[in-house]
Image: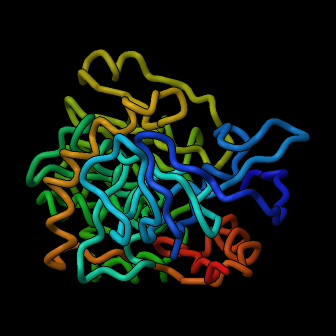
Amino acid sequence: MTDTATVLELRDSPMPEPGPRQLLVRMHAAGLNHGEFLLGHGLHGKPGTWKAIGGEGAGEVVSVGAKVAGFRQGDRVMGRCAGAFSEYALMESAEAMTVPPGLSWEQAASIPLTFLVAYDMLVLQGRLKRDEWLLINGVSSGVGVASLQLGKTLGARVIGTSGSADKLAALKPLGLDVALCSRKPDFAAAVMEVTGQHGADLIVNTVGGTVFAENMRALAFEGRLATVGYVDGVVHAEIDLAALHAKRLTLFGVSNKLRTNEQRAAAVPRFVAEVMPHFAVGRIKPHIDQVMDFARLADAKARMEAGSQVGKIILRMPIAS
């Protein structure tokens, strides 16, 4: 694992005021995500500076901006937002989603970032079809589990890699079809074998450069490879141009780092229409590893960085005074 070199510090801040198209939300729960603590992802302040962290959460609307439509005080909402590890946070109304009645605050907080990322990878860019083979590196991570659950809902056959047999066993009830226990880039042959030499139609790489070349070897004709993170800290890898050319492969990245607010929010209405109904009826149930009180943020961060979790780690926010 990469040394994050980040320091947690609790600070008091003034109550934020919502802009014209923003909601002020009393946060009840927030989700942890690797990118907030990895230097290479660039989601925190520059060295020597500080930045409010927390990228997704769920809570109750306290007030709305003058140009907000569709939300009002008291609504239960969830969404991506900056500074979610706070008693109160601002959420762009274009990012806000209504929490289905059957979901707890903790379940709702586990959805926005990871499932929107999975939707981007599997649907918007990955074009995953029923009965295609989906390979997920690091399947026990938050994004990995979300990709597994969404992939099964879309009718795909899912292969997952992990260095822990126990984690893979825990994901079998979620529909994991093939479990490959390995921490090394040595899985391509097994992928080809279980797919009848077809290969993976779509691969989700949550690990990084150490498995990139092996993923290319595991891809099917017209396969797609999504890179969503590099927890291994390896950001350079060899590309087999002959395979890229002959197999008509597609390589793409999944990041919001350089996107505008409008670009980030563009997929939210379609996500609400196509994916949220599955949560509403219980077809997809958020898989939460642990819920910890906000006071244990350091413990939650350590558990995530150690790779001990299966699914999302959620913070239960303190009661606002």
Q: Residue at x 30, y 70 (%)?
A: 99
Q: Is residue 46 above or below residue 24?
A: above
Q: Residue at x 62, y 53 (%)?
A: 16
In percent of width and height, residue 276 lies at 20, 62
Q: Residue at x 23, y 73 (%)?
A: 284
Q: Residue at x 44, y 68 (%)?
A: 58
Residue 256 visible (yes or no):
yes
Nearer the observer, 73 or 301: 73
In percent of width and height, residue 177 lies at 24, 69
Residue that protrudes farthest toward the right in the picture: 48
Residue that protrudes farthest toward the left in the picture: 130
Q: Is residue 79 left or right of residue 101?
A: right
Residue 189 visible (yes or no):
no
Nearer the observer, 56 or 198: 56
Q: Is residue 208 above or below residue 99?
A: above
Q: Quadrant of the N terminus?
A: bottom right
Q: Quadrant of the C terminus?
A: bottom right
In percent of width and height, residue 277 lies at 14, 66
